Image (cartoon, rainbow, N blue to C red):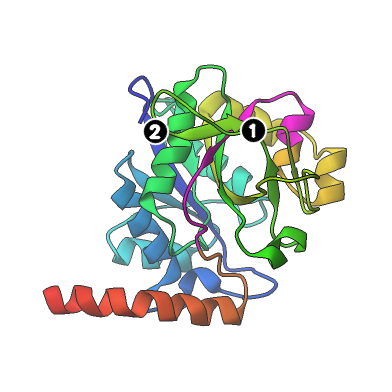
């Protein structure tokens, strides 16, 4: 973690989901999905963790698991807006100057990926950090649901493979021989960068690609990308939920036996 920063992790969550309604509360190995995500974020040990909840029902589940919940306006347009609103409520004095936005539907997120994204802010010129992994499945290269990050990775002094984001797309980019990178929607922001980002109007490329991060690039904000080893399972459909239960059930069983 960059020593000069004071980070906080915020997980936005809401019950309204088109493909999988009420998914933050979906049971996975005996606990709500949002609790699994929260515990992964806590395990990263980068700072306090709070859940930005659109509904009291989510907040109750978070508190029952010993977590911190902040209620936000359910009509906020995006997860980024929810994160910013929760942060203002939780820390109005601005003590925390870096924000990690962990999506609430990533119950298998590796805590090391959270640390890798935060490490990008060690460069004072970087306003936003995010992560990506090499695409190894050929079918994913042309899958529009797999967002591609366009950047030229190099090994930094801290050992992290990183590079400046040039573009994000649902198309197969860049052309030519070489690796393609699967973008993972986890972000770290300098606090002032988050405030600026949510104040900007939606961009033309953002609307065309349906990718919120392009709003930042269109407005000249610097995003860097860290290369990580694994892509976490994003739970968007009943099939994804079934897969998450398969993955996490053995770990939950081992945890119960150890108690």
Name the quarter where the N terminus is drawn.
top left
Residue span colored magenta? 215-232
Pinpoint residue 104: horizontal percent, then vertical percent: 50, 59
**Is residue 77 something that shows in the picture?**
no
Residue hosting label 2: 7
Mark 2 or 1 closer to N-term?
2
Q: Residue furthest front?
A: 177
Q: CA distance from mark 2 to mark 1?
A: 27 Å
Name the quarter where the C terminus is drawn.
bottom left
Q: Is residue 27 above or below residue 10?
A: below
- Residue 152's disc number: 1
Pinpoint residue 7: horizontal percent, then vertical percent: 39, 33
Which picture quadrant has residue 219? Answer: top right
| 247 to the left or right of 178 | left
Q: Residues within 10 Å of mark 2 (few under 14, many from 20)?
A: many
* Viewer-nearest residue: 212 or 86: 212
Residue located 29% across and 43% down the image:
45
Judged from the image, the secondary structure of the residue bearing numbered disc 1 is loop
* Viewer-nearest residue: 155 or 148: 155
| 208 to the left or right of 248 | right
Residue located 38% across and 57% down the image:
38
Q: Residues within 10 Å of mark 1 (few under 14, many from 20)?
A: few
| 73 to the left or right of 18 | left
Residue located 46% across and 46% down the image:
10
């Amino acid at each position: 973690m960059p020593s000069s920063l004071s980070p906080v992790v915020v997980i936005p969550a809401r019950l309204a989901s088109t493909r999988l309604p009420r998914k933050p509360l979906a049971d996975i190995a005996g606990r709500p999905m949002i609790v699994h995500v929260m515990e992964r974020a806590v395990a990263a040990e980068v700072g306090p963790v709070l859940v930005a909840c659109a509904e009291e029902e989510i907040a109750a589940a978070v508190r029952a698991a010993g977590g911190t919940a902040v209620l936000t306006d359910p009509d906020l347009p995006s997860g980024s807006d929810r994160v910013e609103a929760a942060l203002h409520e939780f820390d109005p004095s601005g003590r925390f100057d870096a924000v990690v936005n962990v999506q609430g539907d990533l119950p298998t997120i590796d805590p090391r990926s959270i640390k890798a994204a935060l490490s990008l802010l060690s460069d004072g010129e970087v306003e936003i950090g995010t992560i990506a992994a090499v695409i190894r499945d050929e079918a994913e290269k042309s899958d529009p649901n797999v967002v591609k990050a366009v950047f030229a990775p190099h090994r930094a002094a801290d050992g992290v493979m990183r590079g400046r984001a040039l573009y994000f797309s649902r198309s197969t980019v860049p052309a030519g021989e070489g690796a393609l990178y699967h973008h993972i929607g986890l972000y770290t922001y300098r606090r002032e960068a988050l405030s600026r980002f949510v104040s900007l109007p939606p961009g033309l490329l953002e609307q065309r690609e349906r990718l919120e991060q392009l709003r930042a690039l269109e407005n000249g904000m610097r995003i860097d990308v860290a290369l990580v080893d694994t892509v976490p399972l994003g739970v968007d459909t009943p099939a994804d939920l079934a897969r998450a239960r398969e993955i996490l059930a053995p770990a939950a069983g081992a945890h119960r036996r150890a108690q």
